[in-house]
Amino acid sequence: MKAPRMLGVVGYNDKNRQEYDPMKSKGLGVKEYNITFYALSEEPKFGFMNVNRAELLKSIQKITLAEGTICYKYERSK
C-alpha cells in the first residue's frame, strides 16, 4: 500500500496575500474562531489562482475525504 501524499497549498487571505494573517479581533471581550481542514483525494483544479471561499468549497465538494474543525476562543487585552 502506498503512503498518502501530503500536500498543502497556501491560498489568498482577505488582504489578497499568500501568507498567514491572524484574524482581527474587534473590541474587547471573548471572540470565537473556527479553522476547518480538509483531506482531499486529489488536488483541486482551478482556472485561476485567486479563488474565493465559495469557489473553493464547490471545487472540493466531490473530492473531500474528511474534514475537521478546530474551534477556539480568544480574548484580547486592552
Image (tube, rainbow, N blue to C red):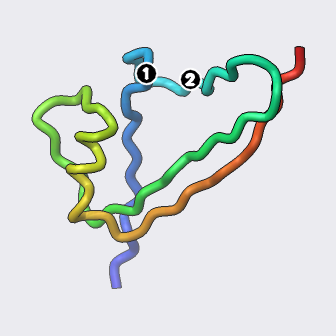
Viewer-proximal residue among 67 and 9: 67
Graded by Cα atoms within 10 Å as few (under 14), some (14 to 19) or many (20 or more), the crowding at tag 1 reads: few
Q: How many marks?
A: 2
| Marking on residue 69 | none
Determine the image quadrant of residue 24: top right
Looking at the image, which residue sits at the far right? 78
Q: Label 2 is placed on what type of residue?
A: Asp
Residue topped by disc 2: 21
Residue located farthest toward the left when viewing the structure as drawn: 47
Q: Are marks 2 and 1 in contact (CB under 8 Å)?
A: yes
Image location (x, y in percent) of residue 50: 25, 26
| Amino acid type of the residue tagged 1 in the rendering | Asp
Residue at horizontal 37 percent and vertical 17 percent from the top: 16
Foreground: 2 or 26? 26
Residue 22 lies, in percent from the top left, at 62, 26
Could you tell me how far apart the alpha carbons at marks 2 and 1 are, in whole angstroms?
9 Å
Horizontal and vertical percent position of residue 62: 21, 64
Q: Quadrant of residue 73?
A: top right
**Direction from residue 28 to residue 24 in the image, left or right:** left
The answer to whether 29 appears left or right of 3 in the picture is right
The outermost residue toward the bottom is 1
Viewport quadrant of the N terminus: bottom left
For this rendering, which residue is in front, 6 or 41? Answer: 41
Which quadrant is home to the C terminus? top right
- For image coordinates 64% across by 41% down, the residue present is 33
Which residue is disc 1 drawn over? 14
Residue at 39%, 74% (x, y): give it.
3
- Element on which disc 2 rests: loop
Residue 67, compared with residue 18, is above or below; it is below
